Amino acid sequence: MAPRILRAHDRTPAPWKNGGGITTEVLAHPQGAGTDDFAWRISVADVASSGPFSAFEGVDRIITVVEGPGMALTVDGTEHVVDTRYAPFAFSGDATTDCRLLDGPIVDFNVMVRRTEAKADVSVERRSTVLRPAPGTRVLAVVLDGTATLDRESVRLGRLDAVLLHDDEDPVDIVVDGVLAIVALMDIH
């Protein structure tokens, strides 16, 4: 099976679960799952104003600032300043979470996993790497800035384009000219 290419221009923006912003889903599992029944969901969100985050019971979240000056997240009463681009921040979707933008709108990258069904790890690469899913794992790589090229297929990925590999696929060399988020997703059986 060949890696699956997911182009940013093929995605359709939708309102947040709480209606407070816009999200664009990169990929969810199972296919066609909504915000209430996904095992895992990866998206990019435009955050134009401060306000509460949607609650996702039973979900672990990892959020990464992609554009803008950042935000202060108050998670169950404790403030966390998330103002470094490309630095993943993990928190519970069960928590009461409020966002205060630091100095204007941001774009963030979101990974959400239902903790009874999946686990996720997010890392960021700024150099060429090999995408090699471990047994029982899928790897989704998303270009957060710049470009990336899949060596084997000579497929070029632009900003917010992604590639998905399953554990039964051969490793893929990826040349990074920018910033790449790598999400390892493992189903819990």
Image: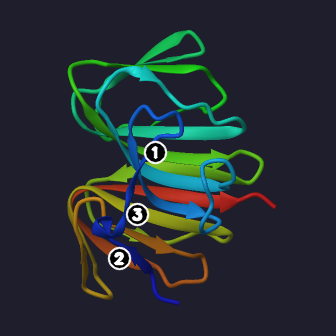
Disc number placed over residue 141 in the picture, else none: 3
Which of discs 3 and 2 lies nearer the camera? The answer is 3
- Residue extending farthest to the top is 77
Q: Tag 1's secondary structure?
A: strand
Check if mark 3's residue and mark 2's residue have beta carbons within 8 Å. no
Disc 1: which residue = 110
Q: Nearer the viewer, residue 175 or 77?
A: 77
Which of discs 3 and 1 lies nearer the camera? The answer is 1
Q: Nearer the viewer, residue 114 or 134?
A: 114
> What colour scheme governs how the chains and residues are painted in the rendered image of this protein?
rainbow
| Percent of width and height locating residue 44 | 38, 49
Horizontal side of 40 relative to 88 (left or right) equals: right
Question: Which kind of residue does numbered mark 2 sit on?
Answer: Asp
Disc number placed over residue 173 in the picture, else none: 2
Q: Tag 2's secondary structure?
A: strand
Question: Which kind of residue does numbered mark 1 sit on?
Answer: Asn
Question: Sequence-wise, which precedes: disc 3 or disc 1?
Answer: 1
Horizontal side of 37 relative to 183 (left or right) equals: right
Marks 3 and 2, how far apart in space?
12 Å
* Residue at image coords 36%, 20%: 50
Question: Sequence-wise, which precedes: disc 1 or disc 2?
Answer: 1
